Image (cartoon, coloured by chain):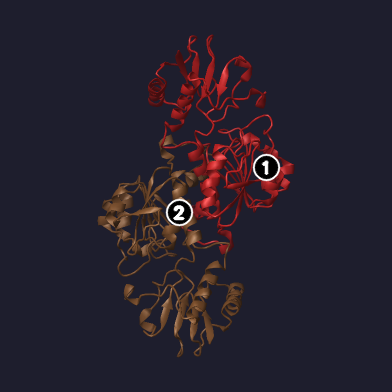
Chain colours: A brown, B red
Amino acid sequence: MKVSVQVNSYYNNEMSKKLLELCRDITGLDAVPGFDDDAEIILFSGRPVPGKKTKFMQSLSAGVNHLDFSKIPDNIIIASNADAYSIPVAETAIGLMLAWARKICISNYNIHNNNYKRLDYKEYVSLYNKSLGILGYGGIGRRTALIAKSFGMNIYAYSRSYKNDGISSYMEPEDIMKKSDFVLISLPLTKETANSINDKMLSLFRGLAIINVGRAGVVDRNSMLNFLRNHNDKYYLTDVWWNEPIINENIPDNVIITPHSAGMSDNIYQPAVAAIENIKNYINGKPKNIVKRSDYI
Amino acid sequence: MKVSVQVNSYYNNEMSKKLLELCRDITGLDAVPGFDDDAEIILFSGRPVPGKKTKFMQSLSAGVNHLDFSKIPDNIIIASNADAYSIPVAETAIGLMLAWARKICISNYNIHNNNYKRLDYKEYVSLYNKSLGILGYGGIGRRTALIAKSFGMNIYAYSRSYKNDGISSYMEPEDIMKKSDFVLISLPLTKETANSINDKMLSLFRGLAIINVGRAGVVDRNSMLNFLRNHNDKYYLTDVWWNEPIINENIPDNVIITPHSAGMSDNIYQPAVAAIENIKNYINGKPKNIVKRSDYI
């Protein structure tokens, strides 16, 4: 068995070389860079090309919504890398919340520009005793909940496969919008979730800020832009934006944004190791994170 | 018994009125605004003036280093409001750390200025498995440790009266400087701690960033400015600055700063309630947070 390692430009030469090494070390299989018609297994980022013998495709990125499923024969098993980025993504979600609540970015900007000023005390929000509603309670949602709990927040959570974990309590999405001070969006982008945060859902929101560390397309673009325009006291704290890296509109002032960097970290190879471990799971007949194609097509 | 409520301009009319109300409700005593020669108790912020009958002075601010002790007769008991601001201050300490580690302020600034760019992946630091050394393990230090632990950080701590709490392990200040990825300064400003983070201490630091949510004067000004100039890859994340609100120098680029707002929060009266509860403790013969004058003079 052979692994074809097909990666996009996010992986520079050094990283690509390291990927091949890790792949050989962890699986014991031969690993070759780029397309290989004889490889049974593909480890990929971006849009991979399956070969004649391909049976298993393992994603390096957590999400697989960008794949062109029509070009991947039905007999090929595709696995996502769900949960591999949960640690840095959860840190970014909490960081965005605190950057807003404690007015860190605006204060730092002002003081660096010779404008030392305090805002009114009511502007400095404390997370203690506030509620955090989480839409999408997978690895990222659960990791964020664990940390938010240590701040003294009350956690509500929704997912299709919700299990009580002693940290959160279950709530329907509409109630989460109505009752949470902060709402975290950590849903995968599927045909069901696409544009699901729409006018109707946003009209229910009474809280302070909505955080998105998932995919931009889960939120309906026009609904959110209207919402932000009409409620300049409510904030969108987001790692993602429609059509990034090309931004087609002025970003409203009530947005704090990072460049889809939530999953990036100085523990560079940790997500790759998770992906390659799952190739080993496949060899042993027990692959995890199998993609349900019907969620996407 | 009567309480004289002497507050500075931080407390506007509405807040001052509320303070008097809370004082009456919680202690059952008469409370009067401003100086009163007959009041046995003073509740104060800023620099209070004791009257002929004053026996107990309760601070609203956590620190009391700004007091002119020579104008307060030795027989008067002074109590600080230590720990009353620990919740929002700890949130700010963690927020400053994440704003830097996850590159939130710089990214937000860039993208709002039509410069959508990701930094190199190594620039996005994850707190997981990093170490946090805490100098001054009182209410703020312990609260920050509790939260940092939930991020998967390893905690070292120093205080004169350190007790093992199962969250941190004890370490001498010099070793904290040598071994920590992040160092949190949450010391009171006393004659012992003033300028204690000096050239010698800074020369030991091998980590990523130093966070100060205590008092500016604990850090020697010239030592820190030289250190930041000579190590532009190391950061000072601080809520305090020498001579604030008048800033006499250009703030270096490797500083993220907030305007001494760490203790401010939308739970406005929570610290006041803590102070007034301690007046009740005094009436019952058990005041807490008694100031040791020899720490200051």
Horizontal and vertical percent position of residue B213: 57, 39
Disc 1 chain ID = B
Q: Identify the image quadrant of the C terminus of chain A.
A: bottom left
Q: Is residue B129 positioned above or below A104 on the image? A: below
Q: Is residue A270 positioned above or below A91 on the image? A: below
In-image side of A107 versus B231 (left or right): left
The amino acid at mark 2 is Leu
- Nearest to the eye among marks 2 and 1: give it: 2
Q: Are marks 2 and 1 on the same chain?
A: no
**Outermost residue, right direction?**
B200
Identify the residue under disc 2.
A146
The amino acid at mark 1 is Met
Q: Name the residue at 39% across, 83% down.
A: A72
Identify the residue under disc 1.
B224
Q: Residues under labels 2 and 1: Cα distance?
A: 36 Å
Horizontal and vertical percent position of residue B131: 61, 52
Disc 2 chain ID = A
**Outermost residue, left direction?**
A200
In-image side of B24 versus A201 (left or right): right
Horizontal and vertical percent position of residue B188: 61, 33
Determine contact: label 2, label 1, CB under 8 Å.
no
Q: Name the residue at 32% across, 50% down.
A: A229
Residue A222 or residue A48, whichever sits in front: A48
Q: Name the residue at 27% across, 55% down.
A: A174
Horizontal and vertical percent position of residue A20: 58, 78
In-image side of B27 versus B131 (left or right): left
